[in-house]
Structures are given as C-alpha cells and as structure tokens.
Amino acid sequence: MVVAVAKWQGRKGRPWRRIVAATKRLPPVCGRCGLQIDMTLPPNHRMSYTTGHRRARARGGVASVANARPEHRACNSSAGADVPGRRTQAFRRSQEW
C-alpha cells in the first residue's frame, strides 16, 4: 500500500498551522528571553506571539512540535537562521575612494 505524503509547504500549509496551534497551548513564555508573552497584542506588534524553532530549519531542524516553541516576534526576528557561509562578505575595492 502506498501512502501519499504531502510536500512540505512551508508556513502556509496545514502541518505548520497544526504546529502553531500546538505551541499556543503551551505556557506563553518566550523560549529565547524567558519573559511572558502577552497573547492580547496584535500580530504585528514586536512583543506579540510567534512560533519559533529551537533548531533552525536551515541548520537541519525539522518542522515538528518538538522543535517549536513560543517566542516574541522581536526575539524570533533577531535570532534569524544564523547559518555560517550564508552571510554576505565584504568585497575588496579596487582602489580607495
């Protein structure tokens, strides 16, 4: 018997929505800074709730509830994936200006 497995759709697919729903049931404490998350703030507020990854997907982390945790939007955004070699490097100029 062959079972069709849906391709990972990133943060727009049903699997990600299930992960977010599961992390919203956890205590609203930021996994990065440890402070309380105000669940009444609008979604675009810097201290509002987001679901972050314990280990970044770019570093081999998986999309699972075990790898997800509640975070402030600001904490999640400032962390980034932090993958070595993906940062832009400064180029040497041909001459001093």
Image: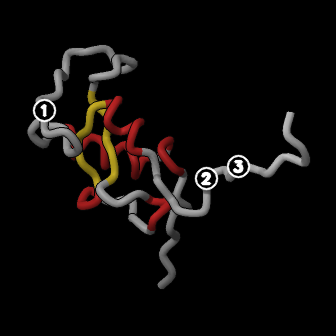
* Amino acid identity at mark 3: Ala
Q: Which residue is mark 3?
A: 90
Q: Tell whether label 2 touches label 3 (CB within 8 Å).
A: no
Q: Residues within 10 Å of mark 2 (few under 14, many from 20)?
A: few
Q: Which residue is mark 1?
A: 35
What is the secondary structure assignment of the residue under circle 3?
loop
* Amino acid identity at mark 2: Arg
Residue 67 location, quadrant: bottom left
Q: Earlier in the sequence, mark 3 or mark 1?
A: 1
Gap in angstroms between the C-alphas marked 3 and 1 = 36 Å
* Amino acid identity at mark 1: Leu
Residue shown at 51%/59% (left/top)? 83
The spot of residue 16 in percent (x, y) is 40, 48
10 in relation to 83, above or below: above
Q: Nearer the viewer, residue 76 or 24?
A: 76
Q: Nearer the viewer, residue 7 or 60?
A: 60
Q: Which residue is mark 2?
A: 87
Q: Residues within 10 Å of mark 1 (few under 14, many from 20)?
A: few
86 in relation to 69, above or below: below
